[in-house]
Image (cartoon, rainbow, N blue to C red):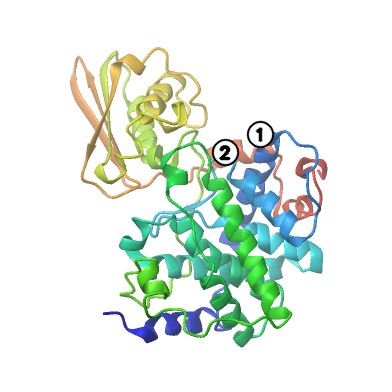
Amino acid sequence: MHDPELGNLILNALTDDAIEFKKDRLDILFQDFVACAVLGEKHYGLSQPPLGTGITERAVTLGLYASALDMDDVDWQVLTHPGSIIWPIAASIGVEKKLSLEEVYEAASYGYRAGATIANFFGTPHRSKWHVTSTSGAFAATSTAAIALGLTKQQHINALHICAMNIGGSPQAGFERKGAPQTNRAAAISLGVASAHAVLIGAPHVEDIWNGPRGLYEMFSIEGSTTQILNGVDTAELRLIDTNGFAHSAVTAASKLYLALKEKVDSITVVLPSSVQGILDASRGGAWWNSAYAVAALWESGDPTNLQSASHFLSLTKLEFEDMPIGAGKVRVETSTGTHEEYVVRAPEEISWREIKWGKAGITSAADSYRRCSSFPLAALR
């Protein structure tokens, strides 16, 4: 039986004015978002987005671009991708309303806090049936828009209620491994902006969003066992390695072994968490989703940011799964001198890797990155 007040307590806490402002980390997360968007724009190959450049259209376009290469930020604590939902709204409203970069960061901070807290509150049962980046992301989008647009605390809560009655997002998008979660993010962005806009014009909202057979608890399999407030900024991590995020720790482990071993390799075993076996069995999605390929390519290039060819080592590499934390990875190498193994719980944000990614997008500063968001194509303002 769920406590009907827990959800309301969380929404009240999330709309509180007091929030810790972590400028240094937000600088990094924001610039990485713009790097992802610039590279995603190149991937799509459009000189101009097909729709207009109002707040919603700009935000949706930025969200699609930022997630196009599957290198937007990740929160391993709650298993979401918050930045490609939060930053498009904060930046788009900022451009329209001529907000300072600090005001954009404040809105984003609320978004990160809302997204991480709601994802944590919704819990594992919800995550097993719904795409939590979409559902918690819609709350994150709404909070971001509410702060950027200057809503009052009560208007902010009302906007979250409107959002709550419209959330969704099937995890099937991710299981097909064809990039469809990009549009899940875009839908969350649209809903967040629409929810805040609806409140501004005085649209009605549902008061009891949690209870009964049509409430959030039952419809969305919400665990609802904690009222912990997470700031979301501390746990958001960059993705800098040239493969899917679940394989980053394994590639990091392989890189350590590659640098340490100066001998012929007889075999390579990549070990990933059992919890991701269903989506990382290499049956679909091509090389990006084949973690054995990624490690074999690392052994060929020696560079985690360049995993384009695995022709020399793929036949020597096999994939296994065992119980370990999600996001962790292990690599075991057999040589004539014996077995060599490395285990990594979380891939680091190596500055050299970040510089390569940002360099490809021409990222030089947070201020320049913000200017980029004011015009399409994003690479034009240099």
Q: Nearer the viewer, residue 188 or 212?
A: 212
Q: Residues within 10 Å of mark 2 (few under 14, many from 20)?
A: many
**Occupied quadrant, residue 197:** bottom right
Q: Residue furthest front?
A: 213
**Distance from the alpha carbon under mark 2 to that under mark 1:** 8 Å
Residue topped by disc 2: 69
Q: Residues within 10 Å of mark 1 (few under 14, many from 20)?
A: few
135 to 208, vertically: above or below:
above
Residue 233 visible, this angle = no
Q: Nearer the viewer, residue 50 or 148?
A: 50
Identify which residue is drawn at 53% across, 39% down: 179
Residue topped by disc 1: 43
Q: Amino acid at mark 2?
A: Leu
296 to 178, vertically: above or below:
above
Q: Assess whether mark 1 and mark 2 are in contact (beta carbons under 8 angstroms).
A: yes
Q: Nearer the viewer, residue 3 or 251?
A: 3
* Residue 3 falls left or right of residue 301: left
Identify which residue is drawn at 39% across, 68% down: 219
* Residue 312 falls left or right of residue 83: left
Q: On residue 101, which mark appears?
A: none
